């Protein structure tokens, strides 16, 4: 059952990524897909979070389950506050949720599947490409989490 949820989460991630890449809007992070998806963005992110949480909890040692909850739950907050360019309050919620989720995903992956941290190599171009740095970091974080879940 865990593999099914993981595959659904990966497919949702790929759909959001594809919508963002194929849109006419500027695409520098997954959240830019909000401006194309509008009301579909939150359900997609929330479902991705729930589908990631269930298998993550099944492989997380009990003392570290809070990392899985934060990592996944905060992705739903990112979806709720999708309009990060317009509303200043939503921007704060969005950015803080995304940052804490990323930190928790790195910590969680370190505990559950340390070799999956190799995905962080994808973030190396972020040092040079300031415009796309958030997208590189998102790809690395989602990649390492999904890899850990599939192993």
Image (cartoon, rainbow, N blue to C red):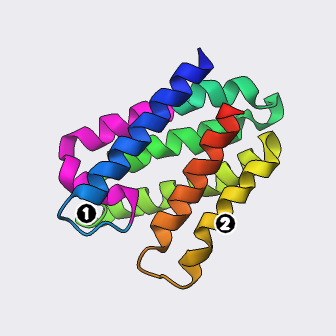
Residue 104 belongs to the span the image colors magenta: no
- Nearest the camera: 102 or 70? 102
Kindly report the secondary structure that dominates the magenta region of the rendered protein: helix
- Which residue lies at the image location 21% right of the left edge and 56% below the top edge? 35
Q: Which residues are magenta?
A: 29-51
Residue 4 vs 105, above or below: the answer is above
Residue 151 vs 32, above or below: the answer is above
Q: Secondary structure at mark 1?
A: loop
Q: Evaluate if marks 2 and 1 touch, with contact meaning CB atoms under 8 Å apart.
A: no
Kindly identify which numbered label has been placed on residue 87.
Answer: 1
Query: Which residue corresponds to mark 2?
Result: 121
10 Å crowding of disc 1: few (<14), some (14-19), many (20+) = few
- Nearest the camera: 89 or 32? 32
- Which residue lies at the image location 61% right of the left edge and 20% below the top edge? 2
Q: Secondary structure at mark 2?
A: helix
The location of residue 86, given as percent across then percent down, is 22, 65
């Amino acid at each position: 059952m865990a593999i099914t949820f993981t595959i659904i989460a990966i497919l949702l991630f790929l759909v959001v990524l594809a919508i963002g890449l194929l849109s006419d809007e500027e695409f520098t992070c997954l959240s830019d897909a909000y401006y194309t998806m509008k009301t579909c963005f939150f359900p997609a992110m929330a479902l991705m979070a729930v589908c990631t949480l269930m298998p993550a909890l099944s492989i997380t040692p009990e003392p570290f389950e809070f990392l899985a909850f934060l990592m996944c739950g905060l992705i739903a907050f990112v979806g709720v506050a999708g309009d990060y360019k317009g509303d200043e309050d939503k921007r704060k919620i969005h950015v803080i949720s995304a940052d804490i989720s990323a930190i928790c995903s790195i910590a969680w992956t370190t505990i559950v599947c340390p070799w999956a941290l190799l995905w962080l190599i994808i973030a190396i171009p972020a040092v040079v490409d300031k415009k796309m740095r958030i997208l590189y970091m998102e790809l690395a974080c989602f990649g390492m989490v999904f890899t850990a879940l599939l192993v």
